[in-house]
Amino acid sequence: MKQDQIKELLLQSLEHERGGVKVYETALQCVLNDELKEEFEKYLEQTRNHERVLLNVFSKLGLDAEEASPGRTVVKLIGAALVEAMQSALESGKPEAAELVAAECVVLAETKDHADWELIAKCAEHLTGKEQKVLKDASDEVEDQEDEHLYHSKGWARELWLQSLGMKAMLPPPEERQHVKTAIGAARAEQASERNR
């Protein structure tokens, strides 16, 4: 395994969790639906914890959590762009549109977040010794939450779009009602959503 790329993955993941905190803080300013607000508040707290988990990984592996890298800079810029997009939507004065933009920005952020944690878990599978244990323990603690964040957020964004289009929407989405935490479960929930229209 390429140690420099493992470190790069961890640097980007940490930066992304930090940006994720800002994404959720801003998204919560946009949310109108009380159940979505409750969901995003929970995800915000979990994201703060994911940052702590990664800081612990850096500490245990003797890595510098503040080390700069070109990839980390890009991740920071993307997070800032998502926050800026939501702020712009808020300033437009259309609350429903801002809520929809927030849901989409969360989906975009959670897509990378989910991928990062899947890659961290894959690294753990191919490492040995202390590195394996540290990465496995971290991914075991976080990965199920990341699954929920991605699949539930995608459901919210889809259903809010349907509502905005004047179609029948299921709020909260079936992904949340069914406590989906797998891609198969998300596909089934989306099919259930289609059948109920």
Image: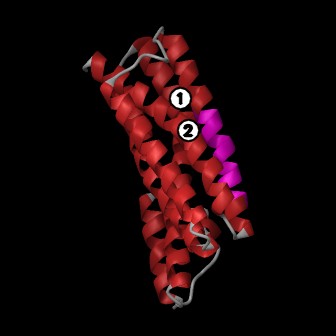
Q: Position of residue 69 (x, y in %)?
A: 34, 22
In the rendered image, residue 64, in percent from the top left (x then y), is placed at 47, 12
Within 10 angstroms of label 2, few (less than 14), some, or many (20 or more) residues? many
Residue 96 position within the rendered picture, expressed as x and y whole percent measured from the top left: 61, 74
Work out which residue is located at the far top of the displayed protein and give it: 62
Quarter location, residue 102: bottom right
Report which quarter residue 45 is drawn in. Answer: top right
For the residues labelled 2 and 1, say whether their Cβ atoms are less than 8 Å apart: yes
Q: Residue at x 52, y 90 (%)?
A: 167
Q: Is residue 197 above or below residue 90?
A: below
What residue sits right under mark 1 in the picture?
Answer: 138
Decide which of 151, 188 is in the foreground and name it.
Answer: 151
Part of the protein shown in magenta? 38-50
Q: Amino acid at mark 1?
A: Ala
| Residue at which label 2 appears | 142
Q: Who is closer to the viewer here, 193 or 110?
A: 110
Relative to residue 1, is residue 25 depicted above or below?
below
Nearer to us in this view, 35 or 95: 95
Which numbered disc covers residue 146? none
Q: Quadrant of the N terminus?
A: top left
Q: Is residue 29 magenta?
A: no
